[in-house]
Image (cartoon, rainbow, N blue to C red):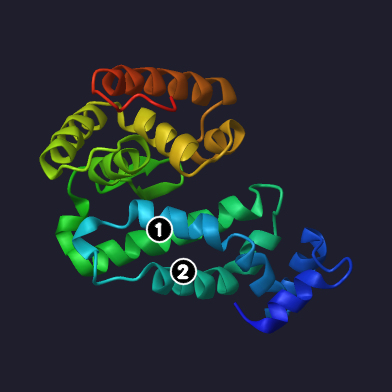
Amino acid sequence: MSEPSSALLKSPGSADPDVLLSRAVGGDEAAFAAMFDAQRDRLRRLVRLRLDRRLSGRVDSDDVLQDAYLEARKRLPEFARDPQAMPFHLWLRLVTGQKLTDLHRFHLGAKARDAGMEVSLHRGAFPQASSVSLAAQLLGKMTSASRAAIRAEHKLILQEALNGMDPIDREVLTLRHFELLSNEETALVLGLTNKAASNRYIRALKRLKEILTSIPGMNEGW
């Protein structure tokens, strides 16, 4: 963000989350900037993963994060009233996802309600990572194929497999494997028990492994 936020994080004792939250709620912009900056990379990963591909080139992830920053700053007292309800980084994730949903609806209108655009969660609609986005992530990590035809074939196979998953199973896979949330965080985000979240992840991962192992060169690292 700005130099004040960087300086704040380096000040002895000032990076304590409770201290920063208290100062931010009291109107200290540098304190809130420091809290947001600490989560910036995670939020950027969320936006890039869930931004609809139809908006590629029209919407910049940093602009989404700026909107999320302003919205979260405005709603910070809402979080501060019950900070135990959700960890701060998950609350920021929720606010960012809601801004992304609004952005999709603004740019795409009725098309934003197409299947695969949103997943219905206990906290409302949230942008869903498309099979196209997830397949691209997997291909980027898993394959060394340089020929476009082979890559395209792999991508279609992965997309079909991902589309065939239960929506919540796929969301669990997205949260755990791509957003790198813990099982406890995933359960909280989806309103599941820890055991249910773990079982769904194991099931989704097993299914994806079956697909990956059937594609030459796609099963390394699983």
Q: Is residue 36 above or below residue 83?
A: below
Q: Position of residue 86 (x, y in %)?
A: 63, 48
Residue ID at (77%, 75%): 8
Where on the picture, by quarter, is residue 219? Answer: top left
Residue at 82% of width from left, 61% of height from top? 16
Residue depicted at x 33% and y 46%: 128
On screen, residue 99 above or below 94: below
- The picture quadrant where one finds residue 101 is bottom left
* Numbered badge on residue 47: 1
Image coordinates for residue 166, horizontal then vertical, percent: 30, 26
Helix, strand or loop for disc 1:
helix
150 on left or right of 104:
left
User: Where is residue 69 drawn, in percent x and y?
Assistant: 53, 71
Residue 132 is drawn in which quadrant?
top left
Q: CA distance from mark 1 to mark 2?
A: 8 Å
Q: Is residue 26 visible?
A: no
Who's the residue at 61% across and 33% down the image? 184
Determine whether label 1 and label 2 are within 8 Å by CB.
yes
Front position in the image: 190 or 208: 208
Quarter of the image containing the C terminus? top left
In the displayed structure, 67 sits above or below 183; it is below
Q: Please state which amino acid type lies under the numbered disc 1.
A: Val
Q: Which mark is residue 30?
A: none
Q: Secondary structure at mark 2?
A: helix
Query: Relative to 131, is 60 on the left or the right?
Result: right
63, above or below 84, in the image: below
Outermost residue, left side = 149
**Residue that mark 2 sits on:** 65
Is residue 168 shown to the viewer in this render?
yes
Furthest-right residue in this view: 12
